[in-house]
Image (cartoon, rainbow, N blue to C red):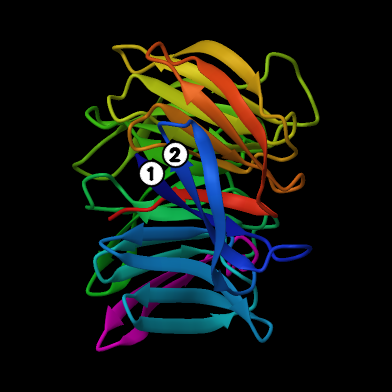
Amino acid sequence: MLEKFYLGSYTKRESKGLYSVVLDTEKKELLDLKIEKETNNPTYLDNKEKKLVMVSGKNGKGGILYTDNAIILESYTEDAVPCYVALNKDIILTANYHTASLIAYKVSDNKLEILDIVEHNEDKDEKKSHIHYSDWSKDKKYILACDLGKDTLLTYKLNNNKFELVSTYKTKKGAGPRHLTFHPTLDIAYLICELDASIEVLSYSKENGSFELIEKVNLLENESDKKWAAAIKLTKDGKFLYASNRGYDLILAYSILENARLKKLATYKTNGLVPRDFAISSNEKFLIVAHQDSDNLTLFERNNDGSLNLLNSDFYAPEIVCVKNKED
């Protein structure tokens, strides 16, 4: 079986834009690195129902590039390239770390329309906001945003095409919430925090979109300056969780207990520098890790007990910081 993955990248050194790669699950190897779209800094992307959207830069501005078959739409209105983008039917969300903005777009009549913008640095708080994530809750009732700068997880509703803040969860001071993922069957979310290298296990309320802490797990056993937690992914059965640490170039594997708490299984070196993102194959037998600074992809084989076996770590792919399964 052949499975395609999109690769988002920085374009500061060798990369030309958005790439793709193919995983041959029978031969257990990566093949056919291909440039899909030449553009500036497509560092994050999403794809659903043959639609593809990526963050991008053009003429000194940041924004998004959207494709749907032959249709290509672009919008560049921000002073910096966003760091996260999510797609749900005809609505697109972006989060911008540098400008601290949360934007909702609508695809309508072959145009990109901005529905609403929330600027998170309008108050006089000395601690600056850095919005690192914006996506829907798993029931699609709410829009969630991670403010890494102010240690908050924000819950919004999109009412009459306007953002309405309905709940705020505070992490530990200095944690730096980065990304969030939901358990497939339980009302549980796992919040990875970049600055203190931790995962917060949270209960989720469908009624009001609020979160409560169940436990906090440190990815690193010893105190260190190299915190820098990055990506977090769950298996489809909700039994295993994987996280990356780009300070020590690690993948950490956990089993998820029946009470949703985490039990550490193992730590794996990724054989590269700065593993910003990774993806699990659709059959969940492989894990692909991307490295920002060493320009290589690492391929692991994944076992039924959640453990990983290193297969290869010398597949060239430049400046990759996002790996996404291509959804048909």
Q: Residue at x 32, y 53 (%)?
A: 327
- Magenta span includes 102: yes
Residue neighbourhood size for the residue with mark 1, other residues' Cα within 10 Å, grouped as few (<14), some (14–19), many (≥20) = few
According to the image, label 2 marks what residue? 24
User: Residue 298, image x and y in percent?
Assistant: 62, 35
309 horizontally vs 189: left or right: right
Q: Residue at x 45, y 30 (%)?
A: 286
According to the image, label 1 marks what residue? 2
Local SS, label 2: strand
Residue range of the region highlighted in magenta in the rendering: 97-123
Q: Are marks 2 and 1 in contact (CB under 8 Å)?
A: yes
Amino acid type assigned to the residue bearing label 2 in the image: Asp
User: Residue 79, image x and y in percent?
Assistant: 64, 78
Looking at the rendering, in which quadrant would you find the N terminus? top left
Q: Quadrant of residue 273?
A: top right
55 horizontally vs 104: left or right: right
User: Does residue 100 appear in the picture of this structure?
Assistant: no
Frontmost residue, 94 versus 206: 94
Spatial CA distance of label 2 from label 1 is 5 Å
140 horizontally vs 174: left or right: left
